[in-house]
Image: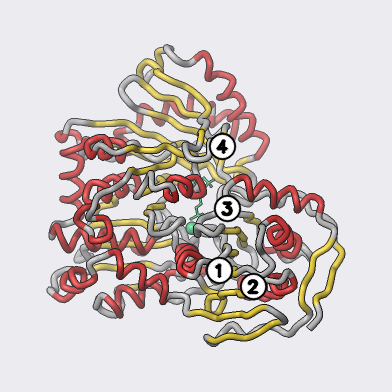
Amino acid sequence: MSARTVTTTPFSGQRPGTSGLRKKVSVFQQPHYLENFVQSVLDSVEGIAGGTLVIGGDGRYYNRRAIQTIVKMAAAAGCARLLVGRGGILSTPAVSAVIRKHKALGGIVLSASHNPGGPGGDFGIKYNIANGGPAPDKITGAIYRRTLEITRYRIVDAPDVDLESPGTTQLNDTEIQVIDPVADYAGLMESLFDFDGIHNLFDAGGFRMCFDAMHAVTGPYATEILERRLGAPPGTVINGTPLEDFGGGHPDPNLAHARELVDTLYGAGGPDFGAASDGDGDRNMILGKRFFVTPSDSLAVLAANAHLVPGYRLGLAGVARSMPTSQAVDRVAERLGIECYETPTGWKFFGNLLDAGKATLCGEESFGTGSDHLREKDGLWAVLFWLNLLAVRAQPIAQLVREHWARFGRNYYSRHDYEGIDLKSAEGLMGHLRERLPALPGELLSAGPVSYADDFSYTDPVDGSISSGQGVRIGFADGSRVVYRLSGTGTEGATLRVYLESYEPDPARHDQDPQQALARLIRLAEELADIRGRTGRDAPSVIT
Ligand code: VG1
Ligand code: CO
């Protein structure tokens, strides 16, 4: 079948954000929109002709359509082999696992992660490189520049490829292999965790868990691993069938959007352990009976206990967290005598540290945790890590975390999001804050004297690349912080994120409500940025 050349003109705004290009489905449905971006990827990556690419997505609306287009374009570009998840399904961590295991050149991930799906929802596309991780800025920059000058794309004229049954088909010189989306990933999990120990935990009775797949991609993964391989009773996984619109929900595992799970864990007779994952399976939420583990605390607890888990029994080379993530893990690193790296928001910044063997565990406050087993954050991995810890320590989650606080102190932490605000006002607010930065250090504010105030800039310790303008941070003498940044994943207006953190060493004061413990800092954060005046909002839209 012949490859056809189609003439096209550039679209503005195809710049990848924190994690790929995310837009409304209707934007992606414009003629040539997807094709322009895909051709820009294929043109910007070396080795496409003759190379192997992994393709899959979170199953949201437009996934199937987009994959057919991408397969035919990859064939026109001369790819030797495509590994495609059956039904077009691959979670983000599974793409990373498959790229690494099969030594592929890279992968194309179709997802808008935690953003809602369906015809009125969001769609997204992202390129991952040979290490299995999101393309770094150097590559996404080149892709973006290409989108601005594109004049043609190439696509093979062929009927749709059957992606529903495993097996191999040929499209011109390209071999298309439809793979089981779960197998490689599940095998990797078995190599890291004590599956027998976790199986015993379920067999012994008395321990119950509930995993909410939120009608997103992790359903098949969680059912296979938790219920089939680890012996959790059927029904442990809820909302386990992936739906194109995630059942109308917001596949974002947090206290606001995973309401059903939260109510189950906080209700009478609830299970011992609750967990959820997001649209594409890279985020996780961890709950105990009437107890929420913040992602920042989760990272710190995993780091402090990693030696109890087979895959990490030799200890950690180092840890890394994104700048707005709480400093709880820093204290663990200090105690362990290992390095703790602070990176900008977005998993792509962890790739070099992981490749260089400088960090073993990484995490973000936004419900993302992962390790050097992959180059993406990994929702189910975090859940299995917790299950393994529970099997070893045989304690309720709340007790385990309280003991952690007693040893290391507690970092009270919260994020306040102001979603869908006017872009100009949001930029004005950030600009105004930046102007005030030089005068702030030494000033006495209601949270005490300011010890530093800057716009975070990161120099990658491996390749020396510099990423500046990564978020305004204001730190106080007692270790409290306020961080402001604008989201790079939204598709409507702007989202202002305000991150708040304070440190409490005294165990007698570890049982406060974080919103109360942080009340003074919250007020100060609002005043400093004049959030009300500049956005017209009295309160955040989401508090996590
Ligand atoms: C958000 C989170 C960030 C995360 C990113 C992708 O980005 O804050 O920590 O890496 O989403 O996660 P932003 O720019 O909106 O703050 V996922 O699960 O959406 O791929
Ligand atoms: Co995600």
Label 3 residue near ligand 1, CB within 8 Å: no
Please state which of residues 125 and 243 is positioned toward the viewer in this rendering.
125
SS category of the residue bearing label 2: helix
Q: Mark 4 highlights which residue?
A: 465
Please state which of residues 137 and 440 is positioned toward the viewer in this rendering.
137
Q: Quadrant of residue 339?
A: top left
Q: Quadrant of the N terminus?
A: bottom right
- Per the model, the C-alpha gap separating discs 1 and 2 is 8 Å
- Per the model, the C-alpha gap separating discs 3 and 2 is 19 Å
Contact between labelled residues 2 and 3, with CB atoms less than 8 Å apart:
no
Q: Amino acid at mark 1?
A: Gly
Contact between labelled residues 3 and 4, with CB atoms less than 8 Å apart:
no
Residue 18: image location, x then y, percent: 56, 48
Q: Quadrant of residue 72?
A: bottom right
Disc nearest the viewer among 3 and 1: 3
Identified at 35% across, 31% down, the residue is: 519
Disc nearest the viewer among 3 and 2: 3
Label 1 residue near ligand 2, CB within 8 Å: no
Tell me the number on the disc at residue 135: 3
First reached walking from the N terminus: tag 4 or tag 3? 3
Count of marks placed on residues: 4
Residue 388: image location, x then y, percent: 22, 62
Residue 274: image location, x then y, percent: 29, 62
